[in-house]
Image (cartoon, rainbow, N blue to C red):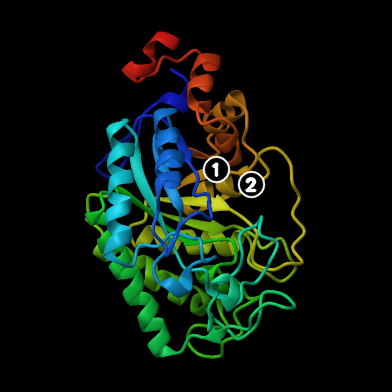
Amino acid sequence: MPQLFEPYTLRSITLKNRIVVSPMCEYSAVDGVPNDWHFVHLGSRAVGGAALVFTEATAVEADGRISPEDTGIYNDEQEAAWALIAAFVEAQGSVPGIQLAHAGRKASTGSPWSGIGPAGPEHGGWSPIWSSSPTAFADGWQTPVALDESGLERVRAAFREGTVRSQRAGFKVIEVHAAHGYLMGQFLSPLVNQRTDEYGGTLENRMRFPLEIVSIVREAWPAELPILVRISCTDWAEGGWDVQQSIAFAKECKRLGIEAIDCSSGGTVPWQKIELGPGYQVPFAEAVRRDAGIATAAVGLITEPRQAEAILEEGKADLIVLARELLRDPYWPRRAAKELGAQIPVPPQYARAW
């Protein structure tokens, strides 16, 4: 059996293979409520054979949405809609996962295809938005308000509530979003975090609030169910967050009971210079896995089955996270199984095609 199709256990959850559907924003919700698009989008990837199917970045409060069309899990209507989707994903033999997120200073923006950039009230946007420090993401973007203690407590409570709602909705895995320059990353990165209190300055201080959130989620989530944390392993900018800081953060996450680190990169500042190429983020997953002693998920321009298999065989990561390749082909896991010589279950409705 190729390693890509070997089971993998995270606490009480056993994934049927190592293929994970990356959180991918669809910009298609109304008032944070997922709808038929999300049901079909996520359900198709479950039918396609992926073991773990993550929702898009799902905001824990309305102000934490990236766009007015982002999903949320901060009210009963959203929770009920997610429950239908999670149940279908699980019925296909996949594990439903949710990524809990807060956009911070990158909130209140338009969808990528809208062309409007920061979204004003006329486009459903809102003010204020929040961050570690009062610096805008880019020229022309809204200047955020630095979270004071009451604001920090509001966000803590929102993640706690989002965690409880996620369990009630039937999700079996949570991923805390601390990547791509969103709120948790705005505390971690020295390029954004200009605070002079206990949440800014040193690495220990910059990690403090994200680790508080990780701890809150871990305490509110059932002990038998796993949690991942997605990080940007580098800001791709001089003086920013880097791999060594990522390793230090991963060690602290492990100490708090986190099962794996999802190793992405970038998104913190607009002047980043990313060195793109096939599997360009895999070395980050390898370094964190080796030096922090924690399982990792590799993501980023992984497109071919043999490429994914080699990453696992060489011990560079434990899970393979696919994003755009699964947009192009929801049935990539089935194609990969055929190419690698593995046999995997097929829904009876589709068995005559295999």
Q: Is residue 292 left or right of 76 when viewed as pictured?
A: right
Evaluate if marks 2 and 1 touch, with contact meaning CB atoms under 8 Å apart.
Answer: yes
Q: Position of residue 238 (x, y in %)?
A: 75, 68
Tag on residue 333? none
Q: Is residue 102 above or below residue 44?
A: below
Residue 205's place in the image compared with 229, above or below, is below
Identify the residue under disc 1: 298
- For this rendering, which residue is in front, 116 or 141? 116
**In whole angstroms, how far apart are the C-alphas of marks 2 and 1?**
7 Å
- Give how far across and how far down residue 283 sits, in percent: 63, 45
**Residue 182 can be seen in this image:** yes
Quadrant in which residue 273 is drawn: bottom right
Q: Secondary structure at mark 1?
A: strand
Residue 132, given in percent of the width and then of the height, sits at: 54, 81
- Judge from the rendering whether residue 8 lies leftward or rightward of residue 203; answer left or right: left
Give amino acid for label 2.
Answer: Gln
Name which residue type carries label 1: Ala
Q: Residue at x 61, y 59 (%)?
A: 111
Is the C terminus in the top left, top right, bottom left or bottom right quadrant?
A: top left
User: Can residue 354 be seen from the camera position used here?
Assistant: no
Disc 1 residue crowd, few under 14, some 14–19, many 20+, Cα 10 Å: many
User: Label for residue 281?
Assistant: 2
Assign the N terminus to one quadrant of the image.
top left
Q: Is residue 173 left or right of residue 167?
A: right
